[in-house]
Amino acid sequence: MKYKSVVGFEHDMSEHLGVLMLNLGTPEAPTPTAVRRYLAEFLKDPRVVEIPRPVWWLILHGVILRVRPSRSAKAYQAVWTDKGSPLLDVARRQAAGLQGLLSERFGDNVHVELGMRYGKPSVAEALGRLKSSNVRRLLVLPLYPQYSGTTTASTFDAVTNEMTTWRWLPELRFINHYHDEPGYIDALCDSIRAAAAEKGEPERLLFSFHGIPKRYFMAGDPYHCHCHKTARLVAERLGLDDDRWMVSFQSRVGRDEWLQPYTDETLKLWGGDGVESVHVIAPGFSADCLETLEEIDVENRGYFIDAGGKEYHYIPCLNDDPAHLEMLAGLIERHCRGWPEVERLAHAQAA
Ligand SMILES: C=CC1=C(C)c2cc3[nH]c(cc4nc(cc5[nH]c(cc1n2)c(C)c5CCC(=O)O)C(CCC(=O)O)=C4C)c(C)c3C=C
Ligand SMILES: [Fe+2]
Ligand SMILES: [Fe+2]
């Protein structure tokens, strides 16, 4: 419905509720050039690398962007499919699935968009589409279950930065984390049980999370605590004895100390200590990506087996599993309480 104001401007009065799903992002192609472009955008984010800018600029341009792109491109080639980067492929399926679930629940006035913090589809593109759909209320969902300044807060920066150019801001809500959400814990438990039913009960279960530099944690980033709580809740629900599971951190970059224990060192130690079978789950990743499909399923498998381990199974991310999408839809619904698109339906259902 169009409404013409007394001064002649036309406003579209059919208001919409927008859900902006965001993830990290990925290169456009598994080539050194595309990976270099992606890494340049990613690694210049001051939330990700907290080194004084002039010093970091010299290291980034002098060393990292000369060496890393071709090495990382090889790793990306190992996981690339005919649908492109796994992270983006899964994220698109998650967005389509969520749109379906939310439309079923709340009708046509809910609009889901996918954006990536680095690369494409950019946060600006996704927000632009929501703006043209006349979204007046916006829920931002960063797909990081555990909060970190390096990921969650950086996503917030990107959204609010883009909005500095908007005249008419939507009402805005932002999901901070969902590391202890019961539906998330249940979905993780189900995937662990399914792996045990298919491959047999492992001697050990490793919860591997992406690391961050230890000094970010010491300065107050709650990420480490969120990771441990997720793993503890899962282990408690599964009734696992303490000596059967552990938390470790992967994907460290550079020479600084990162959160410990490290995933690679843990698996080498276990392989050498006579642990025969291991299942590895990566609950901090909502979608399979380079860090799970290559680093966990290929590289770390090699470390465990080479050290003497026998059986190694990687438990995939929750991806677009119905239980995962149902959990996210419930989370979204809860964070939209009080907004008319959600309340109208809740009232209609109660009547
Ligand atoms: C250099 C510092 C980095 C920090 C801090 C960091 C934190 C962090 N990252 C994720 C999730 C993902 N990271 C991914 C790739 C990736 N991460 C870094 C560096 C840091 N991450 C680099 C350089 C890369 C690129 C690959 C490489 O060159 O090794 C990915 C996968 C992207 C993909 O395309 O598949 C994800 C996802 C989290 C959750 C996190 C902190 C909590
Ligand atoms: Fe990362
Ligand atoms: Fe990695």
Image: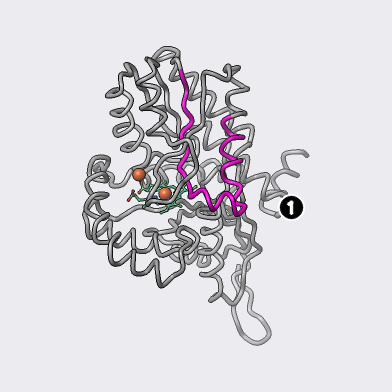
Q: Residue at label 1?
A: 338
Amino acid type of the residue tagged 1 in the rendering: Gly
Q: Residue at x 50, y 60 (%)?
A: 47
Image position, residue 341 (x, y; %): 66, 53
- Residues 59 and 68: in front is 59
Image position, residue 308 (x, y; %): 30, 19
Image position, residue 278 (x, y; %): 40, 20
The answer to which quarter of the image holds residue 63 is bottom left
- Residues 180 and 304: in front is 304
Residue 90 located left or right of residue 34: right
Are there few (<14), some (14-19), or many (20+) residues within 10 Å of tag 1? few
Q: Does residue 175 sit above or below 351 in this rendering? A: below
Q: Secondary structure at mark 1?
A: loop
For the view shown, which residue lies furthest in the right direction?
351
Residue 346 located left or right of residue 225: right
Q: Residue at x 46, y 68 (%)?
A: 52
For the view shown, which residue lies furthest in the bottom direction?
7
User: What's drawn in magenta, residue-wise?
Assistant: 204-231
